[in-house]
Amino acid sequence: MSVNQARLVQTFADLVAIDALSFEEREMADYLKKVWQETCGVTLQEDGAAARIGGTAGNLFGRLNGDPGKSGLLLSAHMDTVAPGRGKRAVVQADGRITSDGSTILGADDAAALAIILEACRELTEEQISHRPVELLFTVAEEAYARGAAVFDLSQVESRLAYCLDCSDRMGSYSAQEPTLLSFELTVQGKAAHAGFKPEAGVNAVACAAAAIARLPQGWQDPHTTFNIGRIEGGTATNIVPDMVTVKGEIRSAVHEDALACWQQTVDIFEAEAGKNGAGIKAAKIIHLTAYHISPADPALRDYQTVLHRRGLEAYAKPSFGGSDNNILVKQGLSGLCLFNPMHDIHTTHEYTKISELVEMTEIVKDLLTL
Ligand SMILES: [Zn+2]
């Protein structure tokens, strides 16, 4: 199926030009509502995520009616970008790549997906080609541990298959697995005292935390689990024994139980080191994402493979350690697949996409919708 390349590239450039940092997706949401109404007659409903997670916009959900005799599918992409993402501009290079001007990210992550999904649906509508019923989900705050998708009410989704276009690799790739992602905050509670007059009356919370951290190897815990302490705050002045310190970090693992075991070990070591010195601890964790693995029999994968084979392409199973909205979709029982989205060197100012890949991925989405 042919694709209107010029219009696709223009839509992509229009999307790139919109500032949409996580929690600041208002303008992007308004643009998408307008363009989907005008081009496909789709009304995108906005949920209450803005108030729940402290952003300027909610998740958008809508339906494009299709052949009721065919099974429906959900197409999903995220509206937000990472920093530096203000004042982005799409620059078309002579070799067919599209880059930023070098001072910002490009935001093909995930605007390329937004452009592809729109163009695919728009062309099927214009050409009056029979297609599967489509549900659309455009989320906020994916880059912040998928917090937008996490509060979206998935019970309203009728499709059993979902495609989330957010995997950065090469044509035909998909995320074969995505990890559990757990963030934590440990507070060590000691006792303040004057550091010069009566230090023996104090319990040094910083020293307790340091002793615990020294026992916790950072980085890889095993071939599929990482541990990182990313922030420490504590104490008030150089002449006061510090009574409190907070330690923040994250654990990610391809095996959910191993992430939980790593967390338990962390708490045990903090408790032991604090206990030795008469300090207490408070431990809090948030499990943002739960690990999943795509089985070869997965129905969404089967359809993707069928479409790729027809084009002479092979599916490529990429192990991802990033996590995406697809973790949420799979956890809620959908057969969800995180598909290739044409984006490279993401989260850097060197990020780029290729026009040829934007076009080919639009064809693939059209093929999935007409399968
Ligand atoms: Zn992304």
Image: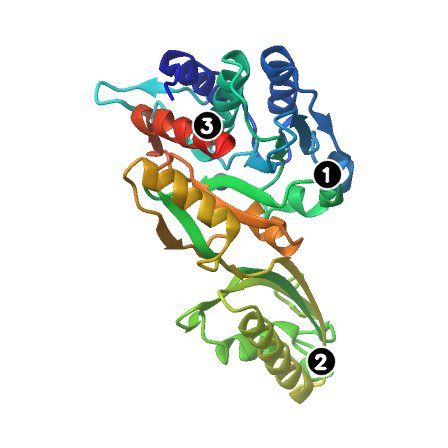
Q: How many marks?
A: 3
- Classify mark 3: residues with Cα within 10 Å, few (<14), some (14-19) or many (20+): many
Q: CA distance from mark 1 to mark 3?
A: 35 Å
| Left-right relation of 306 to 265 | left
Q: CA distance from mark 3 to mark 2?
A: 61 Å
Could you tell which of marks 1 and 2 lies nearer the N-terminus?
1
Q: Position of residue 344 (x, y in %)?
A: 34, 38
Secondary structure under the numbered disc 1 in the rendered image = loop
Residue type, numbered disc 2: Ala
Instruction: Provide the residue designation for mark 1.
Output: 54
Secondary structure under the numbered disc 3 in the rendered image = helix
For the N terminus, the image quarter is top left
Q: Position of residue 78 (x, y in %)?
A: 56, 35
Q: Nearer the viewer, residue 290 or 275?
A: 290
Q: Tell me, for residue 240, which label it has, or none.
A: none
Q: Position of residue 177 (x, y in %)?
A: 47, 58
Q: Nearer the viewer, residue 144 or 359?
A: 359
Could you tell which of marks 1 and 3 lies nearer the N-terminus?
1
| Left-right relation of 337 to 58 | left
Instruction: Provide the residue designation for mark 2.
Output: 279
The structure residue drawn at horizontal position 21% and vertical position 22%, both measured from the top left corner, is: 95
Q: Quadrant of residue 310?
A: top left
Q: Tell me, for residue 366, which label it has, or none.
A: 3
